[in-house]
Amino acid sequence: MSEIFRELTVDLGERSYPIIIGSGLLGSTDLSPYVAGSQVMIVTNDTVAPLYLDKIRNSFPGKQVDTVVLPDGEKFKDWQTLNQIFDALLEQRHSRKTTLVALGGGVIGDMAGFAAACYQRGVPFIQVPTTLLSQVDSSVGGKTGINHPLGKNMIGAFHQPQVVLIDTDTLQTLPPREVSAGLAEVIKYGLIRDTEFLAWLEDNMDALVGLEAGALAEAIYRSCACKAEVVALDEREGGLRAILNLGHTFGHAIETFAGYGTWLHGEAVGTGMLMAADLSVREGMISRTDYERTANLIIRAGLPRLPPETMVPDDFMRLMAVDKKNVDGQLRLVLLKAIGNAIVTAGASSGHLSGTLSSFCQEA
Amino acid sequence: MSEIFRELTVDLGERSYPIIIGSGLLGSTDLSPYVAGSQVMIVTNDTVAPLYLDKIRNSFPGKQVDTVVLPDGEKFKDWQTLNQIFDALLEQRHSRKTTLVALGGGVIGDMAGFAAACYQRGVPFIQVPTTLLSQVDSSVGGKTGINHPLGKNMIGAFHQPQVVLIDTDTLQTLPPREVSAGLAEVIKYGLIRDTEFLAWLEDNMDALVGLEAGALAEAIYRSCACKAEVVALDEREGGLRAILNLGHTFGHAIETFAGYGTWLHGEAVGTGMLMAADLSVREGMISRTDYERTANLIIRAGLPRLPPETMVPDDFMRLMAVDKKNVDGQLRLVLLKAIGNAIVTAGASSGHLSGTLSSFCQEA
């Protein structure tokens, strides 16, 4: 049985689109109204394909539906794998009226979205996220791209989907580690913009980790609503949108150091948010009690508190130097001015930053 | 001595930009007002670098100027070579406030422009075209991209430059074959939209082939004016813009068949325009006299009349099936309803198309 829990809109003028959240939606929702042409290319990976590919194939009555199945994992978020999508599109003679469908987690969404942004200079696409992380974060907002050996998400485009279809049932098959990774981004929304939601998370974290459907749907809805609001205010990250990167500068350094895919993105963001909260304490912005409150949520979500054992402060400094937020060589970080109020600043003292890095790096 | 011959604007609202045409401009024009940040990456190739790189390096006083020199040729318009630009940007720690500068012909412009469209999800860029073809066509209008083994320009983006700087002096060092290739696109503007310009070309073709500066500047100005007008009316090729592809569907098939770079793009377009004109005669749109008028200009410009000797009609049919203009498997072609009036149509009779292919293919 299918049931729509909530629907909301990302408000971007003529590029506005709906986010549909519910259970049993995969296979029972007709997505053909969102397809302008007659061709559809479903992009998925070899983990998700056996679970949901048949269901989604039935969502486009009357259309030519082709599929391309990529290997699963962040380490395949590269040009070689992206090119498999272009190969499939050209071999099946997809025109520039085709629509791509991303069925999978954040890696699939980023790659299918970027392929859609570039194929014949741009075709539409649909997001069908199947992991918690992609449902609450990466499927909304139009950021697409691939990694480069020298930096994560360094090559990409802003390209908004036609619709985001979130079926919460897919979370029931998700490994616990990936649930935790998704919860990192959920906690993020509370920390940067929504203290009420943060309190709700403190009350419901056990239900979320236990995959209770109602709690998950509510957390996804509130996360998407927060993200949609920020993206509508600043689509191309001229300013405000950068707060969505809380924990990501430290986190990307961890991911690059560990090798893409060794740490899950959300795990690295979890640790990164703790580091950002610690630096915010040193900068006199939040209290040690606020830090502990953050740490408690991170721990209850099952996320790691510390970066990889062998990582030293210099590793962070070197890897954070290529962050996209940096301007003219100046490191810019998202910090917490208060719980529920994130800011972007190039003004953090290097002494305080050293203090944070030393206290988190185990061999420092 | 530097002298600005003409300046015109591509009118795209907040993405409008100037095209500056003149002689002696390279090295004497301060381009720093067009650079928002403090970093500049000049992208060029190993043919153009010895001639003009030093001059253009001096055009950005007060900025950090880095360079990346790519191998010269259409066969390098691929992902591997594009990645050299990303490598250089990341190794030199260019932020998302950097500006890319394309110094070279169409391949450099397309690749630097696409790199700018994708680097950190989009940075600004400047076009400094040094070939006739890039000055009259590819540097204006924001089409960027690379080739795929299964089709030309299949991966790319619409990304408009900040300014186009055209120094006509660079044409004096251009090999005659490349002058001819550029003249193909010049003739195209007369054919699709400007009979007065076509008559001017008939009067001035010898001066153009002889590289007379005044004639070249005038031809470039009128070509850019025509392209700017079409692009302003239809930036993303929803309709009208497709007429700029006169001769390109046949031409791309020739380029792909011959192997990228064996035929110059303009050479293939020249032959392609003749084939389109021939088909237009068969469709009863233009007269055989109009065709001969077109053929005379193509021949006087030094362009080939026939496709590669070994190319058969089936090669055209197979290779044209992946053209970007096609919709739902239907071949769409740009034809001449009259001299000076091009249209896009899916309605050409297959019998007439066979007739054209048979008469141009030497082994048919």
Image (spheres, coloured by chain):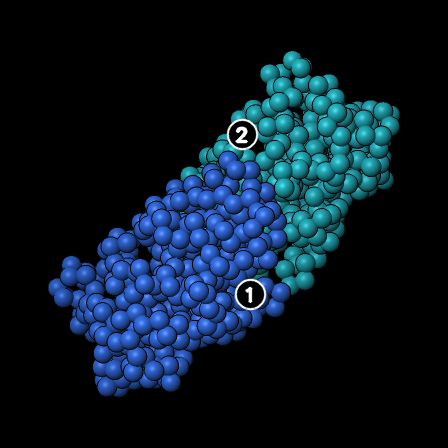
Chain colours: A cyan, B blue
Q: Quadrant of residue B175?
A: bottom left
Residue A226 position within the rendered picture, expressed as x and y whole percent measured from the top left: 75, 46
Q: Residue at x 74, y 39 (%)?
A: A345
Position of B142 relative to A268 (above/below): below
Instruction: In this rendered view, identify the residue nearer to me: A11 or A9.
Output: A11
Task: Determine whether, in the image, residue B16 is placed left or right of residue A343.
Answer: left
Farthest residue, direction top: A363
Amino acid type at image mark 1: Tyr
Across the whole image, how many numbered discs are drawn on residues?
A: 2
Classed neighbour count for the residue bearing mark 2: other residues with Cα under 10 Å, few (<14), some (14–19), many (≥20): many
Task: Determine whether, in the image, residue A198 is placed left or right of residue B93.
Answer: right
Residue A216 position within the rendered picture, expressed as x and y whole percent measured from the top left: 73, 37
Using the rendered image, report if marks 2 and 1 lie on a common chain: no
Instruction: In this rendered view, identify the residue nearer to me: B262 or B155.
Output: B262
Asked which secondary structure carries label 1, the reply is strand
Instruction: In this rendered view, identify the residue nearer to me: A327 or B235.
Output: A327
Q: Chain of mark 2?
A: A
Q: From mark 2 to mark 1, how far is it between C-alphas?
A: 40 Å
Task: Say the numbered circle drawn on residue B17.
Answer: 1
Q: Chain of mark 1?
A: B
Residue at which label 2 appears: A260
Position of A298 relative to B248 (above/below): above
